[in-house]
């Protein structure tokens, strides 16, 4: 079995259009099974999925000796989402080693966000990491990497102005609403579907004094639940059209295949509300609102991409801060990488790997000899099977040996004893 | 003295226009106050200029082409400053200041020294008539400027060009409301201007109405604005459409000014034979 290698595989707003991102996206409660499938794949030892509306990325620790882990991971994702692997392939990116680490740090620090510096991504990464921890697919390597990533994000936030200027999509939407409406206290917002971003926007509108919030989701129970959170009014999805006329701000984030809001619908609502302006914010992936409604008088429609443009206003200013943030990330990448590299040269771990691999090879040869039909596919099958078993069994003990307190807990010495290894030639250095 | 003061006003208006324009386009907090101070300086100098002329002529200086244009420009700035004190609308100021500059420049073109005022122009009703009519026109001028800003802002919003410029813009709602209020204010003033004009006509010539060009124009304007207010109140006209018609309306006001005073100088052009 080979050394641990770090890899990031996935799609994001730079590599894939919305249409692809939305097909691949995971809800938080869908992560568990997907993570288990990932770590069940050959060569994948640990995995965390980060799925937001801008990215679906798998951060994994893989067996360096296993072939093409990026392809393996991409295939699992494609399989999981019933997308043809060939359709997905052109959009998939993969980083390995130091680049993977850098990417993870950049994502967590919001340097890779569509809106650089937006504050939500850190929380989202944490949530997804915790899901993986609960599913048991995040081990010593990823624990360390993610905790470093959170620390880097915090450093970037406190030491650069990136977060100070940062405007999340939600707050960008609310700021934009301010350029349309003078007073919020006589305005009503309508949430169609409830997502992280739209709920955040609603909360912000609430604190800015919007008078009413109407909530409608496809299941009425959910609408009731969300409405309770904001002190809003739940409305059945079928009656959306009746209530639309009450809404000054309409936020859509429901996953649907066809537009929930059409020009005809808005036309009627406008007439009923005597042409008072309406602001539509489409946070849905795919789009919830027909883009044609922007053509109507007194109607303003923005989708997530437009809001990205909206916050680009002070991008130059942020560009400078972003350079400083990059420097911090580079520094941290180097530091963490040194630690990660040093792990692999711990003699005990190397010795265990060598010993077990030798046993595996020996037993594999024996088994193959006793096989009458020595077709290459049988050889490959047995090779994969034994690798997988060995990897799975060794993963936990080696993770423990890599943990920073391994030496203080005499784990290294115990491991030598348990695996019947020669005492080390020179003193083992604690990796840290 | 009168001309020196007016020159100060003229320069102040164009400088204020530059500073307010800069303030709206570049996100810098200071120039608003500076721009408004310069505009206020111009307004005070302008007021002093009108007062100096009135003192020299021994009559309220609002009757000749020069006096009328100067007085009109002064009122436009005054109405804007009064509104700015309540709402923060530097973007509107960036439109009002160049307009005031242009009208004041127009006044210079028609400059003539003080004259002997015919006795029938020394009437109280005439002053009331002119004050109300010009104030009404100035308020409608403000409505026009507000509408221009509305159209620019609306276009930016529609086209999703959301930059620094937009952040210095008043909200669409504020602009729309202000436009409506200006119309709701300007229209009664226009009406009163016409009524007092008729009263003065009766007093001066013995008949209320003489179908002079300016009077015909005023009547057309009155119907236009009445229709506009009606459309807003009953049909719910607002936003872009209301703004566009408001601008067209003011174009008529301006045209009536030019025609009434310059091209067809009847009673309103200062010849009263």
Image (tube, coloured by chain):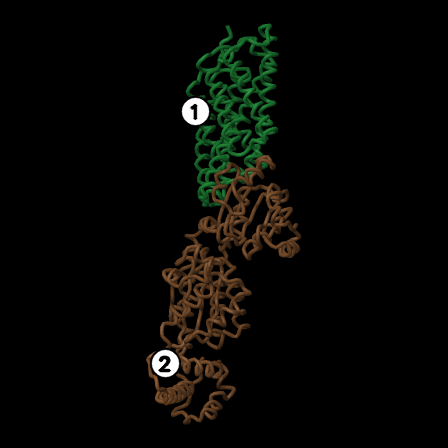
Q: Position of residue B66 (x, y in %)?
A: 47, 18
Q: Is residue B226 above or below residue A256?
A: above
Q: Quadrant where the N terminus of chain A lies?
A: bottom left
> Which one is in front, B42 or A359?
A359
Q: Residue at x 50, y 74 (%)?
A: A137
Q: Is residue B66 visible?
A: no
In which chain is the residue bearing label 1? B
Q: Position of residue A158 (x, y in %)?
A: 50, 63
Q: Position of residue A28 (x, y in %)?
A: 54, 64
Q: Is residue B198 visible?
A: yes
Q: Residue at x 46, y 83 (%)?
A: A394
> Which one is in front, B180 or A288?
A288
Q: CA distance from mark 2 to mark 1?
A: 96 Å
Chain A appears in which tint? brown
Chain assigned green: B
Q: Is residue A296 above or below residue A49?
A: above
> Circle 1 is placed at which residue position?
B105
Q: Is residue B230 above or below residue A320?
A: above
- In the picture, measured across the screen, residue A276 lies left or right of residue A54, that is right
Label 2 crowding class (10 Å Cα cut-off): few <14, some 14-19, many 20+?
few
Question: Residue A2's quadrant in the figure?
Answer: bottom left
> Which one is in front, B63 or A175?
A175
- In the picture, measured across the screen, residue B28 lies left or right of residue A217, that is left
> Circle 2 is placed at which residue position?
A378
In which chain is the residue bearing label 2? A
């Amino acid at each position: 079995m080979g050394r641990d290698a770090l890899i990031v595989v996935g799609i994001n707003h730079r590599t894939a259009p919305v249409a692809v991102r939305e097909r691949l996206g995971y809800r938080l409660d869908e992560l568990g099974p997907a993570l288990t499938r990932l770590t069940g794949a050959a060569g994948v030892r640990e995995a965390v999925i980060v799925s937001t509306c801008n990215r679906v990325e798998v951060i994994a620790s893989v067996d360096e000796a296993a072939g093409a882990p990026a392809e393996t991971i991409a295939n699992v994702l494609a399989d999981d989402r019933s997308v043809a692997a060939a359709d997905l392939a052109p959009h998939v990116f993969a980083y390995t080693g130091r680049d993977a680490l850098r990417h993870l740090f950049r994502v967590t620090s919001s340097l890779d966000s569509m809106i650089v510096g937006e504050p939500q991504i850190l929380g989202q990464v944490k949530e997804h990491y915790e899901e993986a921890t609960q599913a048991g697919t995040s081990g010593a390597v990823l624990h360390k990497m993610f905790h470093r990533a959170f620390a880097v994000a915090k450093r970037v936030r406190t030491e650069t102005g990136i977060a100070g200027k940062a405007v999340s999509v939600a707050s960008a939407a609310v700021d934009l609403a301010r350029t349309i409406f003078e007073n919020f206290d006589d305005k009503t917002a309508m949430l169609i579907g409830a997502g992280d971003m739209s709920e955040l926007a609603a909360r912000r509108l609430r604190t800015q004094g919007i008078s009413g919030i109407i909530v409608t989701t496809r299941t009425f129970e959910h609408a009731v639940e969300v409405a309770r959170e904001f002190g809003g009014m739940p409305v059945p999805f079928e009656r959306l059209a009746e209530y639309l006329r009450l809404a000054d701000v309409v936020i859509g984030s429901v996953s649907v295949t066809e537009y929930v809001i059409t020009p005809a619908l808005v036309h009627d609502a406008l007439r009923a509300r005597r042409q008072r302006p309406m602001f539509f914010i489409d946070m849905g992936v795919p789009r919830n609102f027909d883009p044609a409604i922007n053509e109507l008088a007194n109607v303003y429609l923005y989708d997530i991409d437009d809001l990205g443009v909206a916050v680009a206003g002070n991008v130059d200013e942020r560009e400078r801060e972003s350079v400083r943030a990059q420097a911090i990330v580079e520094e941290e990448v180097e530091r963490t990488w040194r630690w990660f590299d040093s792990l692999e040269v711990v003699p005990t771990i190397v010795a265990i790997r060598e010993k077990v691999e030798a046993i595996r090879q020996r037993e594999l040869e024996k088994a193959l000899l006793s096989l009458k039909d020595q077709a290459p596919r049988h050889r490959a099958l047995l090779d994969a099977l034994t690798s997988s078993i060995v990897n799975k069994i060794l993963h936990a003990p080696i993770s423990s040996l890599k943990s920073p307190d391994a030496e203080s807990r005499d784990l290294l010495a115990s491991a030598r004893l348990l695996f019947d290894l020669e005492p080390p030639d020179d003193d083992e250095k604690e990796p840290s | 003295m009168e001309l020196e003061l007016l020159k100060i006003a003229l320069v102040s208006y164009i400088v204020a226009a530059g500073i307010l324009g800069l303030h709206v386009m570049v996100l810098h907090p200071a120039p608003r106050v500076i721009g408004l101070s310069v505009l206020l300086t111009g307004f005070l100098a302008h007021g002093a200029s009108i007062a100096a002329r009135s003192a020299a002529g021994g009559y309220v200086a609002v009757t000749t082409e020069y006096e009328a244009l100067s007085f009109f420009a002064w009122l436009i700035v005054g109405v804007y400053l009064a509104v700015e004190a309540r709402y923060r609308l530097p973007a509107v100021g960036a439109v009002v200041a160049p307009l005031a500059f242009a009208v004041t420049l127009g006044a210079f073109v028609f400059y003539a020294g003080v004259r002997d005022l015919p006795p029938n122009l020394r009437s109280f009703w005439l002053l009331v008539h002119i004050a109300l009519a010009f104030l009404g026109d100035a308020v409608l001028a403000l409505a026009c400027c507000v509408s221009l800003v509305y159209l620019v802002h609306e276009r930016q919003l529609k086209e999703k060009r959301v930059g620094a410029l937009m952040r210095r813009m008043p909200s669409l709602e504020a602009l729309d409301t202000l436009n409506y209020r200006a119309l709701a204010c300007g229209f009664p003033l226009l009406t009163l201007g016409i009524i007092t004009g008729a009263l003065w006509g009766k007093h001066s010539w013995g008949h209320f109405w003489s179908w002079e060009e300016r009077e015909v124009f005023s009547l057309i304007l009155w119907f236009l604005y009445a229709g506009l207010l009606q459309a807003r109140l009953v049909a719910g006209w607002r936003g872009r459409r209301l703004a566009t018609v408001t601008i067209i309306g003011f174009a008529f006001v301006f045209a009536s000014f030019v025609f009434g005073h310059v091209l067809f100088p009847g009673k309103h052009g200062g010849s009263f034979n």
